[in-house]
Amino acid sequence: MNRLCLLLLLMPSLLFAQPDSVQTLRRQDLKPIETELVPGYYNRYYGPTVRPQYTYDGLDIKTRDLVPYIQASGDPDAIREINTYISNRHTGGWLIAGGVAGMIVGTVMMASNAPGADGKFTMQQPYICPTGFACGYSGGTVYGGQQAGTVTVPDNQRKNVFGAGFAVLLGGGILTSVGWCLNIPGQHVRRAVQYYNRSLRQEQRVSWHLQPGTPTTAAGLTLRGRF
């Protein structure tokens, strides 16, 4: 019974302590995010393009790691832009997955219905000797209604499946490209960082407001500056 009473007394203090333990980022502790353009680096070589490099508290930081800082700022414009970036990343991931699957299916369709060595879509079809005729071939003579050999004819079905496979492959490649572009940090991240830095600058401005005087000052209202 004594332990139960003790837990009931300590429960309110646990609730007050919970926000400090869960939320590790506080707005008043946030610092500006710096941006600079650096050359693109690909497989040991610098590419001809440049990319933005974000820096927080003097250390380089990846774009996806900016999200908690921007969300902790509480600025609605910055949060809206970073949420749009997150949504685009999710959409881009699904498009890439669907595009890669489409490219695999299209490749299999094309490989299994590829043209012959002569580059044509043909197949061998039995040749039936017409009724009332005698047909001779290398193995002898057959009469009407019997197979007299084979004949090469166009294989339109295989040609159509090959063309459909190419269309699926091309569509998968387009989806993959669109998804890849959506995953690249663009103007939404840049604008989110701009709104974030603007909100921090606005908080650092001097604001004047009236407050009750303290015992060390004259009684009544005093004018105080907030920095």
Image: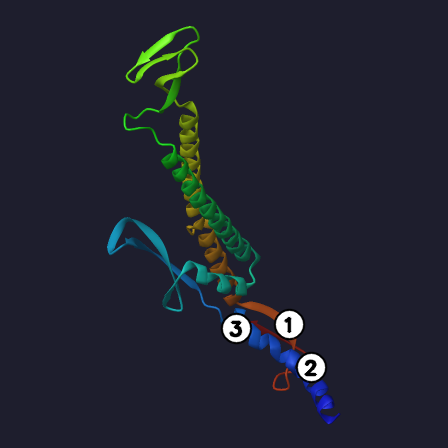
List x then y, in percent, for residue 14: 64, 81
In this rendering, the answer to whether 206 lies above or below 11 is: above
* Residue hosting label 1: 210
Residue 166 in sight here: yes
Q: Camera-side residue: 198 or 170?
A: 170
The answer to whether residue 213 is seen in the rendering is no
Q: For the residues carrying marks 1 and 2, which lies nearer the camera in this image?
A: 2
Secondary structure found at label 3: loop
Q: Which mark is first along the chain, 2 or 1?
A: 2
- The residue lying at 75 percent from left, 92 percent from top is 1
| Percent of width and height locating residue 138 | 28, 16
* In the displayed structure image, the side of residue 63 where residue 12 appears, left or right: right
- Crowdedness near tag 2: few (<14), some (14–19) or many (≥20) residues, C-alpha within 10 Å: few
Q: Looking at the image, tell me whether mark 1 or mark 3 is earlier in sequence order.
A: 3
Q: At numbered mark 2, what does the secondary structure look like: helix, strand or loop?
A: helix
Residue 17, given in percent of the width and then of the height, sits at: 61, 80
Name, please, the residue furthest toward the bottom. Answer: 2
Q: CA distance from mark 2 to mark 3?
A: 21 Å
The amino acid beneath tag 3 is Thr
Residue under pointer 3: 24
Mark 2 / mark 3, whichever is N-terminal: 2
State the CA–CA distance, disc 1 to disc 2: 33 Å
Nearer the observer, 3 or 169? 169
- Residue holding disc 2: 12
Q: Quadrant of residue 173?
A: top left
Amino acid type at image mark 2: Pro
The image quadrant that residue 37 belongs to is bottom left
Marks 1/3: CA–CA distance: 32 Å
Q: Residue at x 72, y 85 (%)?
A: 8
Mark 1: give few (<14), some (14-19) or many (20+) Cα within 10 Å: few
Amino acid tagged 1: Leu
